[in-house]
């Protein structure tokens, strides 16, 4: 009986010690977390993907499963709150078969803390300066020539067209619409994290669709 009580006491001490360590860790994180202004300042510069990233799309395969798509990002942020995002979408997970280059440019609105991690910040990207599409693959250009013809020249590999404020059915954009996303930024150990796409493929175009997890990070370009 005494031995049993001793074992229980040791377990209890271990649990309390572990809980105390977690509380101390959380306290230190909260004390060291960056403010919105510090995150803004740390974001200035050019950031690039570590490797091709996978995200779920809203498209379904023949079996009803969610199709993935692959991309790399280059992100530029300036001290005045302007941004430029360049994405290369690929057909394969290694980025060997690029399909399209997408360039978005505009301004940002910072919306306060995000609960995903201490110092994470909500951010609204508004692409009101540029939204350019450049096919990098003939198959992609052919699809555009089937579904995005009104108001556009013939889509061709390597030729850029602006879809800013235009109807663009492949992306669900309507005439006059300015594209934007409600995302997040979290900077830690020299890495910039954004929000991970929802598992059902929903985008962040609506404020209620703010991400609730972290995407593979980008690193500052040398």
Image (cartoon, grey):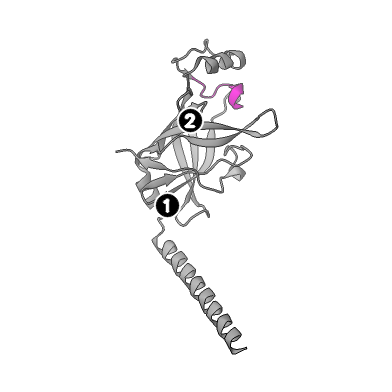
Image height of 166 relative to 48, above or below: above
Which disc is residue 128 wearing?
Answer: 2
| Front-most of residues 184 and 56 | 56
| Front-most of residues 211 and 39 | 211
Q: Mark 1 or mark 2, which is nearer the start of the sequence?
A: 1
The stretch of residues the image draws in magenta is 162-172
Rendering coords of residue 58 (x, y %): 63, 33
| Residue located at (60% from left, 40% from top) | 206
Of circles 2 and 1, the one toward us is 1
Image height of 52 relative to 22, above or below: above
Image height of 219 relative to 135, above or below: below
Q: Secondary structure at mark 1?
A: helix
Direction top: furthest residue: 154
Magenta-span inclusion, residue 140: no
Which disc is residue 121 wearing?
Answer: none
Direction left: furthest residue: 222
Which residue, given by chain and number where applicable, does mark 1 sit on? 36
Q: CA distance from mark 2 to mark 1?
A: 23 Å
Rendering coords of residue 221 (x, y %): 33, 38
Q: Say how many tags the image has.
A: 2
| Residue located at (41% from left, 65% from top) | 28
| Residue located at (42% from left, 52% from top) | 36
């Amino acid at each position: 009986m005494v031995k049993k009580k001793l074992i229980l006491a040791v377990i209890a001490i271990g649990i309390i010690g572990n809980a105390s360590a977690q509380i101390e860790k959380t306290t230190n994180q909260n004390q060291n977390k960056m403010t919105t202004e510090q995150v803004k300042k740390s974001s200035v510069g050019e950031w690039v993907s570590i490797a091709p990233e996978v995200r779920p799309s809203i498209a379904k395969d023949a079996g009803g499963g969610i199709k993935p798509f692959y991309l790399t990002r280059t992100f530029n942020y300036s001290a005045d709150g302007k941004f430029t995002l360049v994405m290369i979408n690929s057909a394969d997970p290694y980025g060997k078969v690029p399909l399209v280059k997408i360039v978005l440019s505009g301004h940002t609105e910072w919306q306060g803390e995000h609960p995903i991690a201490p110092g994470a910040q909500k951010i609204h990207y508004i692409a009101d300066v540029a939204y350019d599409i450049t096919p990098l693959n003939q198959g992609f250009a052919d699809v555009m020539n089937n579904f995005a013809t009104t108001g556009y020249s013939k889509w061709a590999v390597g030729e850029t067209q602006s879809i800013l404020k235009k109807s663009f059915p492949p992306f669900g954009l309507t005439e006059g619409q300015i594209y934007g996303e409600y995302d997040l930024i979290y900077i830690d150990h020299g890495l910039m994290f954004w929000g991970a796409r929802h598992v059902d493929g929903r985008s962040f175009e609506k404020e209620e669709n703010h991400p609730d997890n972290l995407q593979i990070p980008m690193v500052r370009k040398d």
